[in-house]
Image (tube, rainbow, N blue to C red):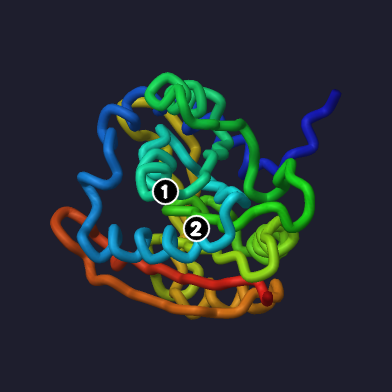
Amino acid sequence: MTDMQPEFLRSTRTSYDAIAPAYAEAFPDWSADSAPLDRSLVAAFAELAREHAPAPVADLGSGPGSVTAHLHALGVPVFGVDLSPRMVALARRAYPDLRFHVGSMTSLDLPDETLGGIIALYSIIHVPTEHLAATFAEFHRVLAPGGHVLLAFQSGDGDDHMRLIERFGQEISLDYHWRTPETVAEALTGAGLLLHARVLREPAGEERRPRAFVLARKRP
């Protein structure tokens, strides 16, 4: 059967499969490495998501699984979804009591209106602008009425784009798209979601770009 997935999904999956072990070693614990403001925003999202329990939250782009585990520790029914099978395997090994699945945020294998929330930390950066509207429409489809979505991403002016061809000593082809909170908020509202909050945090430590957070929800 011919693989009909867009090229950006194939290259992103292949790239993260290549760097998965090194990435997991470099970033073993999101909660320990994140800034206090970042943790507080995720905690606020968790409080909102618990209102919809037992409807679960999907952690999209869950990587090695530490964000999923952090939300679980906050009392959120949560599972992880990642494009990279090697990332999913590492997450399952690290957190055997939690659920992780191979999948794409652009086409979720979920029924309509079944999620109490969606969180995607630093994963929409790999979605090209021309696919963003359809991706957010998919978020709207699977969210239960009143469910929230929290996005975090490195911010940039306009549609700033970069391609990495090497990381952790591995040859890759990975595209990064840096956007403003306003651009992402506009795409979310265009998909029918209601904007709840926008936060832009200045770079800290070794970070080179501001960190943006956008919180939206589906109409109740």
User: Percent position (x, y) of residue 212?
Assistant: 38, 68
Quickly name the residue at label 1. Answer: 75
4 to 20, vertically: above or below: below
Q: Residue at x 54, y 40 (%)?
A: 79
Q: Earlier in the sequence, mark 2 or mark 1?
A: 2
Q: Residue at x 54, y 32 (%)?
A: 100
Left or right? Give the position of 109 relative to 27. right
Q: Secondary structure at mark 1?
A: loop
Left or right? Give the position of 118 relative to 72. right
Q: Residue at x 61, y 65 (%)?
A: 147
Which residue type does callout 1 highlight?
Gly
Which residue type does callout 2 highlight?
Arg
User: Percent position (x, y) of residue 151?
Assistant: 47, 62
Left or right? Give the position of 55 relative to 121. right
Q: Are marks 2 and 1 in contact (CB under 8 Å)?
A: yes
115 to 183, vertically: above or below: above
Residue extending farthest to the right is 1
Q: Which mark is residue 50?
A: 2
Count the numbered circles shown: 2
Q: Secondary structure at mark 2?
A: helix
Quadrant assignment for the N terminus: top right
